[in-house]
Structure formats: C-alpha cells, structure tokens
Image (cartoon, rainbow, N blue to C red):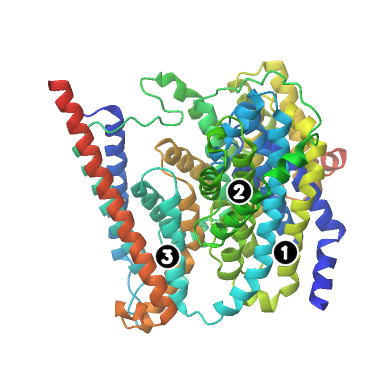
Amino acid sequence: MEVLGEAMGLVFSPDTLLAILGASAFGLLVGAIPGLTASMATALLIPFTFFMDPVPAIATMVTVTAMAIFAGDIPGALLRIPGTPASAAYVDEAYALTRRGRPELALGTALFCSAFGGLFGAIVLIVAAPTLAELAFAFSSFEYFWLACLGLTCTVLVSQGPALKGLVSLMIGLIIATVGLDPLTGQMRFTFGMPELSGGFGIVPVLIGLFAVGEVLRFALNPVEVKPPARTPMRHILKGLMPELWRYRASVLRGSALGSGIGVLPGIGADISPYVSYALARRLSRTPEKFGTGHVEGLASATGANNASLSSAYVPTLVFGIPGDSLTAMIIGVLYMQGLDPGPTAFVQQPAAIYGIFIVFILANLLMIPFGLAAMGILRRVLDVPRRVLMPIILLFCMIGSFAVENTMTAVYVTIGFGILGFALESLRYPLAPVILGIVLGPLVEDRFITSMQFSRGDLLGFFERPIAGVLGVVTLALWALMLWSMVRDAIRRRQKNGVLDQGVSS
Amino acid sequence: MMDRSATREGIAGILTALLGGGIVIESWSIPTVFGFNYGPGFFPGLIGIGLLIAGIVQVATAIVRGAPAPVPVAGVGEGQDTRRWRRPMLVLVIMLALTMAMPHLGFHLTAPVALGLLLVIFSLRWRTAIVMAVIMTMVMDAVFRALLLVPLPWGVLTPWTGVLAWRF
C-alpha cells in the first residue's frame, strides 16, 4: 500500500503530468499525419526522455505510443492510409464507414475501443506481470536464452514479407549489438580501431536513424503528397455511438481479451492481434456478410485488440526484458537509459517505479478519450499539412536530437548511417522490427548463450535438461522447423506456379 | 534472363553473404582469452555463418526462380527515372555537410542554411524556405539549448556566446 502511494506520488507529480500532456499532444499530432508512424513519433521523443526522471520518461513513451496508434486510425478512416502496420487490418472497414457518410462513427469506434482495449491490456499487465516476475526468479541462463530465442523467432515469423528476410534482418541486428567492448573478456569487436565505437552504437541514434531518417529518405525518393480528403460533413462523434458499441459489446470484449493474450507472448507484439481479432469477429458474427462494407463489429473488435496488445506487450518487456515489437524495444532502450533494468529484480528493487508505470497505462488510456474528442477537429486539419514541409524539419530534429543524447557528433554520424541502413532495408522489403529487436536482445542472448555453454561444458543437450528450459527449447525448435518448412513449401509452390505459367506460354 | 526484381534479390543475397563471410573472418581473427572456452568471436562467428548461409540461399532462390512474383518495392518502382535518386542523395550530402561543419561553424549558422536548402530541395519556394529555416532554428535553439541545456556548438560564434545566448 505504501508502494502504491509512492507510485501515485510519482505519477501525479507536475513533471509526469506535464510529460503525459506533452506526449499526448505530440502523439496525437504525429500519429494523425499520414505517412508519419507511431514508431517515428516514439523515436523522435526518445532524446527528450534522456533529460527526465525515470517515471516521467516512461510515461512519455507509454503515452506517445498509445496516442499515436489511436491517431493513426484517423488517416486510416478518412484517407484509407493505415497509420501502423497493425491498423491495416481494419482500415478498409473504417474507410467504408466514411464512404457511407459516417466518418464520426468510424472515428468514435476507433477512439472508444482503443481506450477500452488499452485499459483491458493494462489490467492484464497489472495482474500478470508481478505473478510472472515471481516465476522469473527461478529462471537460469538456459530459460532466458530460450525465451529470448523464442521472442526473436516469433518476431521473424510475424514480420511482413518472407521469413528469410526477417531472419537476415534479425542477424543484422544481432551483429550490430556485438560492436564494441565484449562484456565478458573486455576485448574490442568490430570497432575497426575507432575508439568512439568502444561502447557500441548508442540505442537512441540507432532508433532515430532507422525509423525517422529512413522514413525521410524514403519520402525524398518518392515525395507523394497525400491529397486531403473532401471534407465529409461530420456529426457529433458521440451521437449514436454508445448504442452501436453496446450492441457489439461481446466483440469488443473478445477482441480486447484476444489482443491482451497475444501481446503477452514474447516477440509477437501488437501487429498481428488486429488481424486475428478481425478474422475471429467475422467468423463468429451473426452478420458476416456485412464485413468489408463499413461494419462496426469488425472495426470495434480489431481496434480494441490493437491497443490491448500494445499494453499487454509490456508484460514480457518488464518481466523478462524481452520486447514484443519495435515499440517495446524502444521502451527497453529508455528503461536501460534510465537505470531501470527490466527483469524480475526491478519488481523488488524499484516497485514504486513499476507500479508508477502501471498507473501511467491506466491514465494514458483514460486520457485518450477526452484528448481524442477535443483534438478530433484539429487532427482532421492535420491531414492537410504538406509532408514536404514537415520532413526537412523532422530531419533536423533527428540530427539535433541524436546530438543531444550523447553530446557528440559521432551520434549524428551513427544516425545518418542507420538512416541509410533503414532506407536500404525497407526499400528491399527487409522488415525493420527484427533488426531493432536483435540490437536490443543481442547482448542478452549472447551473454546467456555463452554462460549456458560454459555451464553445460559445450553439451547442447544441457540446454534442455531443466523442465521450463526444455519446454521453451522444444517450442523454439518446433517454430524453427515450421519456418524452414514454410520456406521450402513456398519455394516448391512458386516453382510449380512458374512451371504452369511456362507451360501456358509455350502452348 | 532474370527480371529486375530477381536481380535485386540476387544482389541483396550476394551482399548478405559477403557481410556474413566478412564477419566470420573478422570473428576468427579475434584472439580467445585464457580460461574462456568460448571467446569474444564465438557468437558473432555463428551469426556470420548464419548470414553467409542466408545470403547463399537468397542468391540460389533468385537464380532458381528467375522471375519471382513482382514485389512492389516502396519508392523503388520498376523503370523509374534514376533522376529521382538525386533528392535523397542531396539530402544525405546536406546531412553530412551539416554534421561536418557544425562543430566549426556552429549550430546557429549551419542549421538555418541546411534546413533552408532541404526545404528548397523538397520543392518549397526560396523565400518561404528561408523564413521557415530561421524560425525553426530559433525554435530548436529554444527547445534544446535553452530548455534542455544541450551544449549546441557555437563554432565561430563562440566569442559572442554570452551576448547571443542572452539574446536568444
């Protein structure tokens, strides 16, 4: 109880409330601009968290992601441009509602279901995290190694595009993490004689480069401005919304529960839950024929799942230090930067900060409703802001933001370098999420792997001797086999398809 | 003959394999430390081998497929004018020039020039670009230097730091 009071004090301090307010405005604004993603919004705010105390810093991160992901539904509903990969699952449904002349219903559903889903996920986080943290105390290097491998494998499996490319992205991330001083032996690796790299690459310049600079370079190559939509007359957002949502309460609840469940799994993140939730809502619906024509049921279920998984993805992040996706990977970077090392010990050593984070989740999702309602009119106008004006300004912010964290121009060079890498990888359809998870989890995987190898004296069977490690190991290996099988099957299918096409051409 | 998409995949595979090979060679050259069975090059070496294999598989797939299903690549459309690459290249040149010049000339002189040029490259009119560049430099100075106390480099303006810092 004393801890809870202390946590309340940390959250309801002027610093934290101001940080939440600023992050809300920034997240809503950036998320609403077509083409600017929640990842970019989060990456741009990281340098500012460097100057904050731990709880306001995490509050900033939690709030900006929640707000930006909701705000990403605005260009989705009005322009059919998904704000995040996850919102692509229901963008057609939302846009169909707008075309039917009900944009307020699409936006209202997105707002309220996002907030409800976020709160549901936060409750799952509050209940599950301390319980799992107790379990995590029994984990040895073997369990941590397999859990991290499982998370990384899931990231590759759920990333967009071929699994092989996801795997290459992951290995690039893992190798980037090895640059600098080896923590075990103190030897330099891949620094090529540059003392600036002895500490490895700073996580902030890397994140800003990959997500923000890469995005600007992509726009520079293909500067397509999104035409602002014809102003669809919009009624009051709350008019007729509640009866509509009440009618589909089971779907909203199911979507939120499903999203929370998926988010808890390490390495899965928030990206796939709306797809699964939308598909399930359609399958269980009494009116599946209405899906795709602007049906509230599918939209409500999927948006709820999206924000629910965003909240519950913090369970593996906080308990095991294993992020679910690129957003939670950024949060881990901020946690380390603030000296709040994620893991079960954080629940014992810094309980007030952990409970503070829980309260921030509740607060951010509750504030989403009044802020979203108040900002809706302004946010619709944000769609008109030309990106050719924003992008150069963002670029300069990226460079100065990177400099601000390390006070050295090396950080700016790193940002530029990783901007080029992010641009190249995305242009060739290599997913970025595995890169960033590889960078964040690389040190943990290597440390636990080497420690486990020392313990087992090089016997790989030793990795399966402990019960939990054995189960995690078998599941991970099964997923690797599944990934390999899907690669081979795709190759065979494609070859057969090409063969049929060749025969068709020759005949 | 392979189509452009397959060629691109093949080149990406070759680069991946080369990266992997380079990492393996570099990892093996890191000396192991007495008392450690697995030296600092062990884990990166494994990753290097993984990249090498993945690159070879990518190249083999590109060759076998010949013409894989066309994949719309973001911003890198087929048959597009190579002149389109000028803009990102210019953006990179400006970023590098700004990074190199800032420690010597200072943030307050280099940032408005770089931002103004970037805005013009992104098709904004000169006059608007200059006004926006000056205003945004002042905003960034206020946020980073005055508010967050980041020591932005003054460069050649260092002798007048006191007056300028007070003015801003």
In the depicted view, which residue is nearer to us: A40 or A471? Answer: A471
Residue of label 2:
A306
In the depicted view, which residue is nearer to us: B134 or A315? Answer: A315
Q: Marks 2 and 1, how far apart in space?
A: 18 Å
Q: Residue at x 41, y 43 (%)?
A: A430
Q: Earlier in the sequence, mark 3 or mark 1?
A: 3
In the rendered view, tell whether residue A155 sits above or below residue B39: above
Residue kind at label 1, given as amino acid type: Phe
Q: Please say whether residue A184 is visible from this viewpoint.
A: no
Disc 2, SS: helix
Q: Earlier in the sequence, mark 3 or mark 2?
A: 3
Residue kind at label 2, given as amino acid type: Asn
**Discs 2/1, front:** 2
Q: Earlier in the sequence, mark 2 or mark 1?
A: 2
Please provide percent x and percent y for residue A382.
Answer: 72, 29
Disc 3, SS: helix
**Discs 3/1, front:** 1
Q: Marks 3 and 1, how far apart in space?
A: 27 Å
Residue kind at label 3, given as amino acid type: Cys
- At label 1, counting other C-alpha atoms closer than 10 Å, the crowd grade (few under 14, some 14-19, many 20 or more) is many
- At label 3, counting other C-alpha atoms closer than 10 Å, the crowd grade (few under 14, some 14-19, many 20 or more) is many
Q: Residue at x 44, y 67 (%)?
A: A445
Q: Judge if badges 2 and 1 mark residues of a common chain.
A: yes
Q: Chain of mark 1?
A: A
Left or right position of A160 against A315: left
Please provide percent x and percent y for residue A89.
Answer: 54, 40
Quarter holding residue A309: bottom right
Residue of label 3:
A149
Residue of label 1:
A358
